[in-house]
Image (cartoon, rainbow, N blue to C red):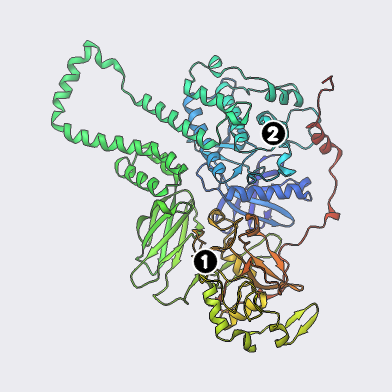
């Protein structure tokens, strides 16, 4: 493949491969930067399971914003080839660095702490890596760490949910597909006992695999080894590894205790997640740094007492200043040591303040520079017009407060993690959203915001800038800018339509009423749009009004026809599926799911949850499903999922009977700013079903690899 182009990527050389993909060094010709381009192995192109895992790798990794997790730039398909474009790491995989004697202790602690921090962030997001091993850890020259390959990651099932077939499958499937039965696979030695037994796994499985890798970094050999697949699995399930301090006496007792707990056979005896391991290792690293910085005791020898006293007397005039400077430096270093814990707590405003204090006191200090690179990224924030006050807060924990950054345009080091931004200027509407931004050549992100004059935006609407909407399996669509309702249409607003004669005015009902192939007359259709008492209104209303106290709840129980008529009444339109999904930035922004109304007992007051969208919307995820303009055959799209749905429906394009009026369905409206191409409203099938008749069986050699995973010694039980 070298020497050719894939989409807008120019491929130069192969730099690695694994069981699923081949990785090339490539150049992004649009953004003029080098990337690592991972493509599916040729023999896997028509394997739907591998394609699913391949896409899952990108989605899992892109959902995690952490300095030690590889950055995903792009995912796509060109010429029938699936690919992921990701950050190109100048370094080498950890497995290539491991020798028979292990790594230097300080380096082991540094690398392990960063890996544990990355896994801890994944576990906090509900993601289990399931393939933790040295080959999936890249180490740069300055020991910066990047964890790769979330291709086996899966979202942890909700408590009480039945395990899926996928969750019961062992993951020792990497390596050359031509590997013969009985040969130890690369991933196998790092399996947890529950993985080896084919049981469901959670974050504690990653903790065990991490412990196996940590043992190998210290000892120079794996804790569990066998002459065959079954021998290695037996060792994982039964054997207790040799104590690390008997192999390497310089290992601190605290580190040995962490390792032993990671390698406990029973999951309940391990750390609950890698976040706890990260905190332990951060403490050990800080203690080691303090020990190294402690002055030697040679000053106590009589031969040096007099010179030391003379120096002390000579410096007495500078004592106060030195003490103050030393106290500030000590406080700044303590602040740097505090950052990992604050990052785990999502307290990004505190991280920002600690970094800025260290910048003032220790601007050239290597530890500060390392923390700056590890826990923050350069961000350029511009507004139109300029001069707005820019603040940010943790996306998941806005209650921790807002941090003022400065006046736009401004460049600042913003902590890694999902944040919400606020831009304020007198005479302009305040912007508050979670914009994604654009990558900048050389690293960092640029965010450009447009602030509206007071009263310049339609009431209750936000501007969504022009841009591209792309969905797997469909050509990208370019969208002009448009307005979108900040909230779902509420009962209060819909009542204005009812009281304004909406159900009696044919001019609001632009679409023909087609039911089971027959076109209904206006009066005939209106007879179907009745509330529970037979009056005009949503199915959930009585006597043409909503339940008491529910004025600001989203209207529900309306058909697609009623939603379209209200939009016409309000001089707006129903958003097309392209408008709706463009406003969500789902390909890179999924934190909104954690702050939305899914799996609940009913809809909540519109905008009452903190699930803020990129451009300032609320409740695009969950609460009520929302009607969209597009049709497919006789059905219309609903998007976003509802209070009664699982979170994955946020990303699933559903088709529904336009006459249906369930309590889970409502809508919001859009309004064009620039003219929209007519084809955006065309009939479209967003998620076509796969033709299973075209799947091919695996070859005999590949089957032997999978069969080997279930081999056992045929001896009396």
Which quadrant holds residue 363? top left
Q: Residue furthest top?
A: 302
Nearest the eye: 378 or 30: 378
Q: Position of residue 352 (x, y in %)?
A: 38, 48
Alpha carbon of mark 2 to alpha carbon of mark 1: how far?
43 Å
Residue 352 seen in the current view: yes
Q: Which residue is mark 1?
A: 606
Nearest the eye: 42 or 627: 627
Q: Position of residue 544 (x, y in %)?
A: 59, 79
Q: Which residue is mark 2?
A: 195
Q: Secondary structure at mark 2?
A: helix
Nearest the eye: 569 or 470: 569
Q: Secondary structure at mark 1?
A: loop
Up-down relation of residue 689 to residue 628 (above or below): above
Up-down relation of residue 182 to residue 71 (above or below): above
Q: Which mark is residue 237?
A: none
Q: Nearer the viewer, mark 2 or mark 1?
A: 1
In the image, is 368 to the left or to the right of 699?
left
In the image, is 667 to the left or to the right of 399?
right
Name the residue rendered at 38%, 70% in the picture. 385
Nearest the eye: 333 or 526: 526
């Amino acid at each position: 493949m070298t020497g050719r182009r894939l989409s807008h990527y120019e491929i130069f050389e192969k730099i690695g491969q694994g069981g699923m993909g081949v990785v090339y060094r490539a150049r992004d010709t649009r953004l003029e930067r080098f990337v690592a381009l991972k493509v599916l192995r040729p023999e896997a192109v028509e394997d739907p399971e591998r394609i699913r895992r391949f896409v899952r790798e990108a989605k899992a990794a892109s959902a995690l914003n952490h300095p030690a997790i590889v950055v995903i730039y792009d995912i796509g398909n060109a010429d029938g080839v699936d690919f992921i474009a990701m950050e190109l790491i100048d370094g080498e995989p950890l497995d290539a660095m491991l020798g028979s004697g292990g790594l230097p202790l300080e380096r082991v602690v540094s690398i392990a702490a960063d890996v544990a921090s990355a896994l801890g962030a994944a576990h906090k997001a509900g993601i289990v890596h399931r393939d933790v091993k040295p080959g999936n850890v890249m180490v740069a020259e300055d020991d910066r760490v990047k964890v790769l390959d979330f291709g086996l990651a899966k979202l942890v099932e909700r408590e009480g949910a039945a395990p899926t077939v996928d969750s019961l499958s062992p993951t020792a499937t990497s390596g050359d597909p031509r590997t013969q039965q009985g040969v130890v696979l690369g991933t196998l030695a790092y399996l947890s006992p529950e993985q080896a037994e084919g049981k469901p796994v959670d974050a504690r499985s990653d903790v065990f695999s991490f412990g196996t890798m940590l043992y190998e970094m210290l000892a120079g050999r794996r804790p569990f080894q066998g002459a065959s697949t079954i021998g290695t699995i037996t060792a994982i399930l039964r054997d207790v590894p040799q104590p690390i301090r008997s192999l390497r006496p310089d290992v601190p007792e605290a580190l040995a205790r962490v390792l032993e707990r990671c390698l406990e056979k029973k999951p309940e005896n391990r750390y609950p997640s890698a976040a706890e391991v990260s905190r332990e290792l951060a403490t050990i690293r800080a203690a080691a740094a303090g020990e190294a910085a402690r002055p030697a005791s040679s000053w106590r020898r009589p031969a040096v007492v007099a010179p030391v006293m003379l120096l002390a007397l000579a410096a007495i005039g500078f004592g106060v200043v030195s003490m103050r400077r030393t106290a500030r430096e000590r406080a700044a270093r303590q602040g740097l040591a505090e950052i990992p814990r604050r990052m785990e707590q999502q307290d990004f405003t505190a991280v920002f303040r600690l970094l800025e204090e260290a910048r003032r006191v220790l601007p050239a200090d290597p530890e500060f520079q390392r923390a700056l690179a590890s826990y923050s990224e350069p961000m350029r924030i511009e507004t139109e017009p300029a001069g707005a006050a820019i603040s940010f807060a943790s996306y998941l924990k806005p209650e921790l407060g807002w941090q003022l950054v400065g006046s736009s345009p401004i460049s600042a080091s913003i902590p890694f993690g999902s944040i919400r931004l606020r831009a304020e200027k007198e005479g302009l509407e305040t912007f508050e959203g979670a914009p994604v931004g654009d990558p900048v050549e050389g690293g960092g992100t640029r965010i450009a915001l447009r602030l509206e004059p007071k009263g310049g935006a339609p009431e209750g609407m936000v501007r969504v800038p022009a841009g591209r909407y792309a969905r797997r399996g469909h050509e990208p669509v370019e969208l002009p800018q448009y307005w979108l309702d900040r909230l779902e249409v509420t009962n209060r607003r819909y009542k204005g339509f009812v009281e304004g004669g909406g159900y009696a005015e044919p001019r609001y009902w632009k679409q023909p009423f087609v039911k089971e192939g027959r076109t209904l007359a206006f009066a005939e259709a209106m007879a179907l749009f009745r509330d529970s008492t037979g009056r005009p209104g949503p199915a959930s209303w009585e006597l043409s009004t909503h339940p008491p106290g529910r004025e600001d709840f989203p209207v529900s129980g309306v058909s697609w026809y009623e939603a379209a008529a209200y939009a016409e009444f309000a001089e707006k339109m129903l958003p097309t599926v392209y408008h709706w999904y463009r406003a969500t930035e789902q390909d890179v922004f999924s934190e909104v799911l954690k702050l939305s109304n899914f799996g609940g007992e009913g809809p909540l007051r519109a905008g009452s949850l903190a699930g803020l969208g990129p451009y300032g919307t609320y409740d695009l995820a969950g609460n009520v499903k929302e009607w969209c303009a597009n049709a497919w055959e006789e059905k219309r799209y609903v998007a976003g999922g509802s209070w009664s749905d699982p979170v994955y429906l946020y990303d699933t394009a559903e088709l529904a009977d336009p006459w249906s009026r369930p309590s889970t369905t409502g809508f919001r409206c859009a309004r064009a700013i620039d003219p929209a191409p007519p084809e955006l409203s065309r009939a479209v099938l967003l998620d076509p079903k796969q033709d299973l008749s075209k799947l091919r069986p695996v070859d005999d050699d590949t089957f032997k690899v999978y069969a080997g995973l279930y081999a056992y010694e045929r001896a009396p039980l």
